[in-house]
Image (spheres, helix red, strand yellow):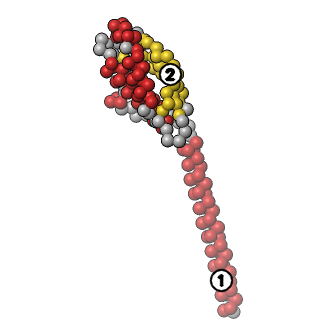
Amino acid sequence: MADSSDKAKKEASTGGSKKKLIIIIGAAVLVLLIGAGVGAYFFLKKEPLEEKKDPGLEVPVPEINQQAEIGPMIDISEFIVNIISDENNHYVKAALTIELSSEPAKEEANKRMPQIRDAILLLVGNKTFEELHDLQGKKQLKAELLSKINAILYSGQAKSIYFTDFVVQ
């Protein structure tokens, strides 16, 4: 008789532990589903983000009427220059326009055109393919050209340089 009561207790205890296990697994799955639902809600919710603006970082943009007047321009006709290269022969084909500060500066620049072209050809010819093939290199070249041209001019100065054609091969 003792054997039959022990068997009944074991069956009852194993049946109870299976029920507990099913309840625990069901609760865990329910918690995971709720967590996934909440996560999906916040992840997929398309709400514009509020950007914090730092007033110190704002740069005032001048209106069109406030912009400086465009100065006289002179064109430098197309030129082709070999550039420094270890492997293949590379060259630059370019044309540019120089914006000057005044009409007297334009007259002087036209008189000194051989000196200006010489300075441009020497400066560009001493560059490498790596220096000129990206945007930063072209900006650096513009700054250097501006400096060289301003060293040649006495009655005014070059305000800006614009590449109207620029090919590096």
Name the amino acid type tagged 2.
Phe
**Mark linked to residue 113:** none
Residue at figure coordinates x 50%, y 22% from the top left: 79
Give percent across and percent down for residue 108: 35, 10
**Residue 155, position in %: x, y?**
30, 11
Viewer-proximal residue among 94 and 23: 94
Mark 1 closeness class: few <14, some 14–19, many ≥20 residues within 10 Å: few
Q: Amino acid at mark 1?
A: Lys
**In x, y percent, where is residue 12?**
66, 79
- Which SS class for mark 1? helix
Is any atom of residue 139 visible in this view?
Answer: no
Q: Quadrant of residue 41?
A: top right
Looking at the image, residue 128 lies above or below residue 100:
below
| Viewer-closest of 88 and 48 | 88
Using the rendered image of the protein, determine whether residue 91 is visible from the camera's viewpoint.
yes
Numbered disc 2: secondary structure: strand
Residue occupying image coordinates x 54% and y 44%: 42
Nearer-the-camera pick, 97 or 69? 97
Q: Which residue is mark 1?
A: 10
Q: Is residue 167 above or below residue 98?
A: below
Q: Position of residue 107 (x, y in %)?
A: 37, 8
Can you tell which quarter of the image residue 6 is in?
A: bottom right
In which quadrant of the rendered image does the N terminus lie?
A: bottom right
Q: Please state if 115 lies on the left or on the right of 22 as rendered.
A: left
**Separation of marks 2 and 1 at Cα, in angstroms:** 99 Å
Label 2 or label 1, whichever comes before in sequence order: 1
Q: Which residue is at a point 43% across and 12% down the rendered structure image?
A: 74
Residue placed under numbered mark 2 in the picture? 79
- Quarter of the figure that contains the C terminus: top right
Label 2: how many Cα within 10 Å (few below 14, some 14–19, many 20+)? some
